[in-house]
Amino acid sequence: MSARLEPEHFARVLAARTDRDLDPVKSLCLACTDVLGVSGAGLMLGSRGRSLGCVGVSDHVTETVEQVEFTVGEGPCVAAFRTKMPVFDPDLADDGAVQWSEFRRGALAAGVRAAFGFPLFVDKVCIGVLNLYHDRSGALTDDQVGDALVVAQFAGRILLNWQADAPPGMVAWQLEKVPNHRMQVHQATGRVSVQAGISLADALVLLRAYAFAENRPITAVAADVANERLRFD
Amino acid sequence: MAREQELLAAFIEFADTIVDEYDVVEFLHRLAERCVKLLHASEAGIMLANRDGSLHYVASSSERMRLIELFELQHEEGPCLDAYRTGVAVHSVLKDDAQTRWPRFAPHAQEVGFESVSALPMRLRSEVIGALNLFSTSPAPLDAEDQLAAQALADIATIGILQERALDSARVVTSQLEVALESRIVIEQAKGIVAERNHVSIDSAFTLLRGYARNNNLLLSQTAQEIIGGTLSTDALTAQPGKDPD
């Protein structure tokens, strides 16, 4: 593990990225990209083996890739959460690769060439994943891997501390922002369940399948459904 | 079992605690038993501090009533309290200290048959969370080797407890986040259902849900859950006094 990455250094980088107008998770993701030298970072949380969704990203490209992963339900970051081990795909364009082909297609289209998932551990509990993306292919160096493991720990603690300070029963305000457009997905699920006369779970599957077939992000499809521009009856 | 093997076994058991779920009280009972074997003590026990700084009994090498009472007495006075407050190990031959140091505790301990007592602070860096207590029927003090081993065992106990508290904390907070997100999701789904059934916009659906919850003194999340579960009909939402749906 790199001896370079001290908490104080990460704190300084994070402070430099903290801005009153910027959402805190985005600042945290940007600090991760600064320290690790990758083009994008995203943070996803999970509880008891279930993904709770992406809570923040460093930039628009990463946002697109996170949506792809959400829509297709596969990718190195999904795998990292499931296995609780780091999962690397250093060359998404490698034709010989067989895994997460739909994720790769979508990520490449967004301009990402490599993806790395690092589980977030707080005191031995896996609370999510730090997703790193790069616009050039290539493996992370040993130093980058070592630093990423440390950064994942910092990020995990920071996220959990935010939630720990939230009023009981409420999502911490710092974690509120990005899930908003996913809230539209759930609104759409409600509409579709009534329109098609199916369960909420089936409605979500239907929306995902439609988004996949139409090659559109699920959040865009959900917005159309929520605003009655698209119906499923 | 040789001394080194006993210590090693204690470390191995402790290593298990940082990997999987484990029962901290069970762990401390076993540690207390190991103390007795390793340190030639007659009995051992662990006391932990409450938020107000007083100590309470957690586990011991046996559950003889008279032994437990000796721990309970230490709520107010005794070697554990001293070790906890000062952060320094305490060793005492009871007949020497009976009158002055612990006028209530010492005579009781002697009555039970103990002649000497030690307490090791359970500390990690600057935090002291309790004390490891050792009782002996011999008046001989702990030798240097035993003192080191005793402190090592106290340290193991400390880390085991802090580990368990931290585990709890991380799990508890992520569960809280999960619950909070889940109830948000339920509310959003209900908005969609109500919007579709009542032919209104999502925002109006929210107004209906919130109005119903308020009028019936329910949580919004409860109302939403009932809509989803089908126990509350969407018609009931519009049949409300003075509610303008749009």
Image (cartoon, rainbow, N blue to C red):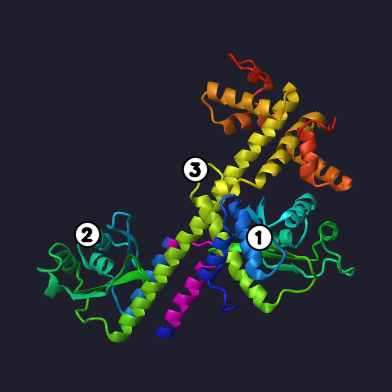
Do the CB atoms of the residues marked 3 and 2 lie less than 8 Å apart? no
Residue at image mark 2: B73
Q: Residues within 10 Å of mark 2 (few under 14, many from 20)?
A: some
For the residues bearing labels 1 and 2, Cβ distance under 8 angstroms: no
Quarter occupied by the N terminus of chain B = bottom left
Q: Quadrant of the C terminus of chain B?
A: top right
Kind of residue at badge 1: Val
Task: Please say whether residue B41 is one of the residues in the magenta stretch.
Answer: no
Viewer-nearest of discs 3 and 2: 3
Q: Chain of mark 3?
A: A
Q: Position of residue B161 (x, y in %)?
A: 42, 64
The residue that disc 3 covers is A168
Give the residue pinned by disc 1.
Answer: A129
Is B23 magenta? The answer is yes
Q: Are marks 3 and 1 in contact (CB under 8 Å)?
A: no
Residue at 78% across, 57% down: A74
Residue B74: image quadrant is bottom left
Give the CA separation, mark 1 to mark 2: 49 Å
B125 vs A171, left or right, is left
Residue B128 in the image: state x and y as whole percent.
33, 66
Identify the element where label 2 is drawn.
helix
Q: CA distance from mark 3 to mark 2?
A: 38 Å
**Going by the image, does A97 lie left or right of B29?**
right
- Residue A26 coordinates in the image, percent (x, y): 63, 55
- Vertical order, A225 against B69 (above or below): above
Give the class, few, some or many, for how many residues have Cα within 10 Å of label 3's Cα (few <14, many ≥20). Answer: few
Measured as percent of width and height from the top left, residue B230 is found at 68, 27
Which chain does the numbered disc 2 sit on? B
| Up-down relation of residue B94 to residue B164 (above or below) | below
**Dot 3 and dot 1 within a common chain:** yes
Distance from disc 3 to disc 1, alpha carbons, whole Å, reads 24 Å
Tell me which residue sits at (56%, 56%) in the image: A159
